[in-house]
Image (spheres, rainbow, N blue to C red):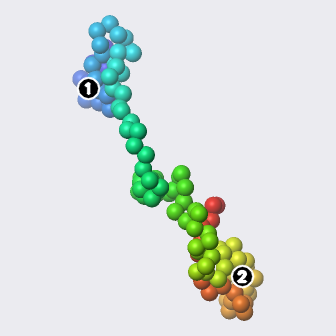
Amino acid sequence: MERRREHDVGIATLFSSVEPAEGAGDAGRWEGTRVPIPEREFDKSQRLAFEKEMLGLYVSDHPLLGLEAALSRHTDCSLAELRDAALAAEPGGAAPEGSCALSAGWSPR
């Protein structure tokens, strides 16, 4: 009865077109509305691209995780070392001698 009133005033829900089965009560309203979830598993790069697109951040992994060795061959220091060098520098002054020129990485924070 309540659904009929909602329908008459123009209120719709995601499953408003689902009619309850005869004599099924509330349980019948959702009969047959189960959406199949495919068993397909996406590879890491595809899954991360979907996460970034849909959520705006990475949830299951990070693209740079596992590449620490490759990154270290092409950089002078880590992000933590770069931060420490910046904190050690005088405000408005030049970077200390021997500080980083090229840094890469990711921060779990």
Residue 105 appearing in the image? yes
Question: Circle 2 sits in a helix, a strand or a loop, which is it?
Answer: helix
Q: Residue at x 36, y 33 (%)?
A: 36
Mark 2 or mark 1: which comes first in sequence?
Answer: 1
Query: Residue 18 location in percent, x, y?
Result: 28, 23
Label 2 crowd bin: few (<14), some (14–19), many (20+), radius 10 Å = some
Q: Locate the C terminus by quadrant.
A: bottom right
Residue at horizontal 52 percent and vertical 63 percent from the top = 63
The amino acid at mark 1 is: Ser
User: Relative to 63, does residue 47 appear above or below in the rendering?
Assistant: above
Quick one: label 1, few (<14), some, or many (20+) residues within 10 Å? few
The amino acid type, in three-letter code, at marker 2 is Ala
Observer-nearest of 3 and 35: 35
- Seen from the viewer's position, the closer of residues 28 and 76 is 76
Q: Determine which of the numbered discs, if any, sits on residue 17 in the image.
A: 1
Q: Which residue is under mark 2?
A: 85
- Counting from the top left corner in percent of width and height, residue 21 is at 29, 13
Q: Position of residue 14 (x, y in %)?
A: 32, 32
Lateral position of residue 19 relative to residue 38, left or right: left
